[in-house]
Image: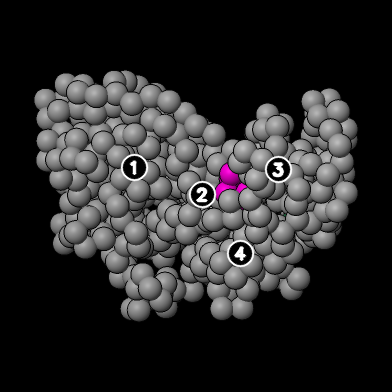
Amino acid sequence: MSRITRRSFVRQSLVTGSAVIAAPYIARSADANGKMGIAVIGGGGRGGSHISEWLRDSRTEIVTICDVDEKAANSRATQIEQKQGFRPKIVKDMRKAFDDDAVDAISTATPNHWHALCGIWAMQAGKDAYVEKPVCHNIAEGSALIAAARKYKKMCQVGTQCRSSAAVIDAVKWMNEGGIGDVKFARGLCYKRRASINPLGDYPIPEEVDFNMWSGPAAYTDPKLTRKRFHYDWHWQRMYGNGDLGNQGPHQTDIARWGLGVDTHPTTIVSYGGRLGYQAERNDSAYIDAGDTANTEVSIYDYGDKCIVFETRGLGITESADDELNTLFQSKKGNKIGVVFYGEGGFLVQKTYDHCVAYDKNMKVIKEFKGGGNHFGNFVDACISRNYKDLNADVREGHLSAGISHLGNISYYVGERNHVTVEEAGKVLKGIKSLDDNAETLKRTVVHLADNKHDLKTYPLSMGPVLTFDPVKEVFPDNSEATALCTREYREGFVCPTADNV
Ligand SMILES: NC(=O)c1ccc[n+]([C@@H]2O[C@H](COP(=O)([O-])OP(=O)(O)OC[C@H]3O[C@@H](n4cnc5c(N)ncnc54)[C@H](O)[C@@H]3O)[C@@H](O)[C@H]2O)c1
């Protein structure tokens, strides 16, 4: 291919007949080979999937791989070189990629605490950004990311790929056209077995990792690691991750909100749960797991006339607790990850990325939806059209959906030390406006814990406060402790700007 500029690549992509549409794409590079230059930030498990996606799109090439883990960066560079025919640049500091004219867009699959700052820095430097879910680590970061996308006129796609899945798009459309009648309530499930991440301890940081850059906007623990496995298990330490409510959760909270047509934050939130069951599993009552996020959590979100309940379970998934859900998911034991919409005339269940099933009130299947999609391709399309409305998962959607996880976790964190008996939890839940049968959901949760031999008398549930949220100002007017958790303390050099100073 002749060496053409990125600007001409984009324009050539928009050729209609012989006329070239003058797209307002601001190209970075003057000497590129006609493809959109991508920098992949974070080459772990998910970064590997990003790489595969960019390599299969003939409109893109990976010019840079950035990882603070030298081994990960080198091995990803080799993988890219073998498929692409040339080796991408390797950088450790993402700002080098943002300063590079060969980079048109970045895709980031770093740990959660880096998502927003990485996206904001990239857009400030003139790059479009594909940012993994949850798009932010806290509420304020999400708003700042939206402000940056709009201010710098950049495309910011969130990695909630179900938004591009034909099955989910068709199912939501069918439901919104009245497929199961009026729908006001959705239940998101993350019943996903997660083993303990080993005891809280003092573990070495891998030599190949630049821990200062890895820690970034989170506190620098000088350099001390309290979990055994360096990569991935940060998900279960709140300084970096958001538990499974904020890990798997944003896929399902996004579908729940999308299906219900809810375009704001909830106004009332409460969570209960805990990091439970690992003592019984190890047969060691003194065992302290290194994680500090809940592995068992029920969160209730009231939107006025609509309601979402999200259930996180990390222990073994047994059959006895879940009659209705077993039938709807057509599976008794094993993980259940999805969304159930409860309509006047039946149920719609999102079961996987590319499969949804509708049932009538008698649990008879009435319709199935199948088919995936190309979320990364949709991002490239929008980078070409320069219209963020062409994105299937614009940053604002990502913020509201990640926000559901953050708000639920805030109630749990504020109430973490408020241990309650099942009866006391039941009493609190009785007073909460919700479209769910709160008592029934609590009962199923307790059965699930008992199935896993968890002793609630020794290790009781934590009950968060019932929080009132101002969805416009993004604060809890009556709870300053909860409001403080809408942001974090940042380290010098890694301060995430607020929405009004991006
Ligand atoms: N959309 C999806 O379906 C999906 C699936 C899996 C993971 N994810 C998301 O992807 C992200 C990464 O998940 P993972 O499982 O790959 O985690 P991981 O811990 O295995 O990998 C993260 C990688 O990022 C690197 N990294 C950390 N800080 C960095 C920095 N400042 N600059 C460059 N690289 C840095 C790490 O060294 C590591 O190689 C998470 O936020 C997760 O929520 C999304």
Q: Secondary structure at mark 3?
A: helix
Quadrant occupied by the C terminus: bottom right
- Using the image, determine if residue 347 lies above or below residue 150: above
First in sequence: mark 1 or mark 3?
3
Please report contact status of discs 1 and 2: CB closer than 8 Å, yes or no.
no
CB under 8 Å between discs 2 and 4 = no
Mark identifier at residue 391:
2
First-in-chain label (1 vs 2): 1
Query: In the drawing, does residue 97 fall left or right of residue 445?
Result: right
Q: What's the residue at 36%, 63% (across, down)?
A: 265
Left or right: 102, with 288 as reference point: right
Q: Is residue 23 above or below residue 376?
A: below
- Asked whether the viewer can see residue 379, the reply is yes
- Chain part drawn in magenta: 379-384
Decide if residue 39 is in sight here: no
**Callout in the foreground (1, 3):** 3
Q: Which residue is mark 4?
A: 153
Q: Is the residue marked by circle 4 packed among few (<14), some (14-19), or many (20+) residues within 10 Å?
A: some
